[in-house]
Image (tube, rainbow, N blue to C red):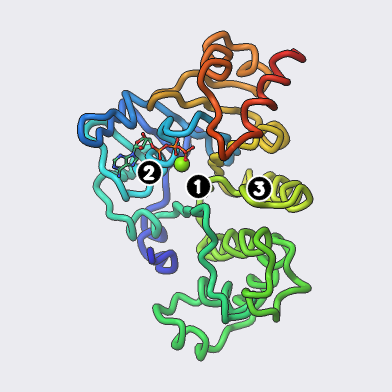
Amino acid sequence: MVNHFDNSFAGTKQPDTKHGVILYVEDVNVSFDGFKALNNLNLYIGDGELRCLIGANGAGKTTLMDVITGKTRPDTGTVHFGQQIDLLKLDEAEIANAGIGRKFQKPTVFENLTVFENIELSLSGCKSVWSSLFHKLNGEQQDRIIEILHIIGLVAERFYPASRLSHGQKQWLEIGMLLASEPKLLLVDEPVAGMTPHETERTAELLTSLAGKHSVVVVEHDMAFVRSIAKTVTVLHQGSVLAEGSMRNIQMNPEVIRVYLGEESAPEQPSTKPSVITELVKS
Ligand SMILES: Nc1ncnc2c1ncn2[C@@H]1O[C@H](COP(=O)(O)OP(=O)(O)OP(=O)(O)O)[C@@H](O)[C@H]1O
Ligand SMILES: [Mg+2]
């Protein structure tokens, strides 16, 4: 597991965002056995913005997150966190410590620990579960945990073992665990997959509330969800940016219409195509 806890790197080098941009991805190419997963990709994320990334299965969304977090090295291109931090020179742990948190699709909470303890573990700076749980929290740390519990809406469940949480609640807990390390940029891959409509709505509120203090990049296939949270949407197609703009602009973009009507939607995401088409027809 990547260590999100040691902030020493972030403490010494904050991303320089005076131009209003927290992430610069420029001319990035990634090939897997000759197949171009990312193709001259350019993406800029504003400081404090909430950006949605959409695109068909295989468009390169997860690969892009892998590049940003150091899991995959691009063949060519540059990736900077703020103006000066060259992410391609850092390994995965250093990137996490620099202030980039990633939430994978599957929640990875400690099932046998309580909700509170899960967050405590992320906050404490201790490297092992046991040393962390025997470490006495100071008042400030306790306050921070309570604050996070409020943000993720799990105050009432704080003494439940995580195993008792619903799928959606586990996703929120994991977001809370990420927040403990105070990431500047949060990458969230398909947060509402498998959630009930109510959980989806609350996740929209949660992610919206994080923007401003954090920059958030959300990959999602659920178009109703994207519409509910996004100011700017980036459409990836075959490893490149096909279109970028408001949801309304995206839906009227002829290239997007062609791609979505032509080849979008995998069988396991049946909601993608109908909702986009409905939107297109309406507009
Ligand atoms: N490690 C890998 N080795 C080989 N091919 C890969 C690897 N990772 C991704 N790919 C391929 O790169 C392309 C982009 O994949 P990626 O997972 O980034 O798509 P995605 O946009 O996240 O799709 P989805 O919406 O299905 O999650 C796909 O064709 C995928 O099969
Ligand atoms: Mg993916």
Q: Are marks 2 and 1 in contact (CB under 8 Å)?
A: yes
Residue placed most toward the observer, 167 or 130: 167
Mark 3 vs 1, N-terminal side: 1
Any mark on residue 103, and which? none
Q: Amino acid at mark 1?
A: Leu
Mark 2 vs 3, N-terminal side: 2
Q: What is the C-alpha distance between the residues marked 3 and 1?
A: 11 Å
Q: How many marks?
A: 3
Q: Amino acid at mark 3?
A: Leu
Which secondary structure, mark 1? Answer: strand
Would you say 231 lies left or right of 42 here?
Answer: right
Residue at 51% from the left image edge and 29% from the top image edge: 55
**Mark 3, residue position:** 207
Q: Amino acid at mark 2?
A: Ile
Place of residue 124 in the rendered image (x, y in percent of width and height, measured from the top left):
50, 77
Up the image or down, 242 lies above or below 81; here it is above
Residue placed most toward the observer, 251 or 69: 251
Place of residue 177 in the rendered image (x, y in percent of width and height, measured from the top left):
56, 65
Mark 2 vs 1, N-terminal side: 2
Query: How many residues crowd mark 1 within 10 Å: few (<14), some (14–19), many (20+)?
Result: many
**Mark 1, residue position:** 187
Residue placed most toward the observer, 269 or 221: 269
Q: Residue lying at the far front in this picture: please name it.
A: 267
